[in-house]
Amino acid sequence: MNKVATTCLQGGCHCGAVRYEVSTALPLDAVECNCSICTKSGYLYLLVNAKQFSLLQGSDDLNTYTFDTHEAKHYFCRHCGIKSFYVPRSNPQGFSINIHCLDDYPELEMTRRTFDGQHWEASFQKLYIKPGVKK
């Protein structure tokens, strides 16, 4: 079995009040989504498990925004307004990291793929639900 080398990256909001650390493999699996919030905010995401994410500072500086199904929890800095991570609807036990908010962006090695968030349910089923397997 091949072991995947991981690296520890740090990131945060624009003003520095919110800081986090994420452990992940390189190249990053960057996903561009065309849903309304990702498009408007220019969000480029990396999905990670909760164990891979650590909020270093700023828990009191975060506000939460939800919409539509209210399953995703979009956290943004109450000072500068930047959403550097959120809890995604597709993985409520994990986090979506905004790659643009990582300290080493844009030098990070990554592969990019797209997700059709405008048709979220159908796209999610296509990616994550195997034929013949009930959700």
Image: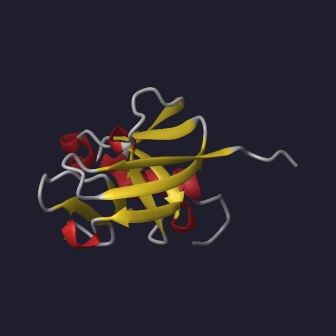
> Relative to 31, does residue 93 appear above or below in the rendering?
below
Q: x, y percentage for residue 25?
A: 62, 44
User: 38 and 46: which one is in front?
Assistant: 46
Q: x, y percentage for residue 72?
A: 32, 67
Number of marks: 0
Left or right of 49: which side holds 102? left
Q: Quadrant of residue 66?
A: bottom left
Q: x, y percentage for residue 42?
A: 25, 39
Q: x, y percentage for residue 98?
A: 36, 47
In the rendered image, the residue lying farthest to the right is 1
In the rendered image, the residue lying farthest to the top is 107
> Relative to 50, does residue 111 appear above or below in the rendering?
above
The colour mode here is secondary structure
Residue occupying the point 28% across, 47% down? 35
Q: Is residue 90 visible?
A: no
Residue occupying the point 59% across, 60% down? 129
User: 134 and 4: which one is in front?
Assistant: 4
User: 15 and 38: which one is in front?
Assistant: 15
**Quarter that holds the C terminus:** bottom right
Q: Is residue 17 visible?
A: yes
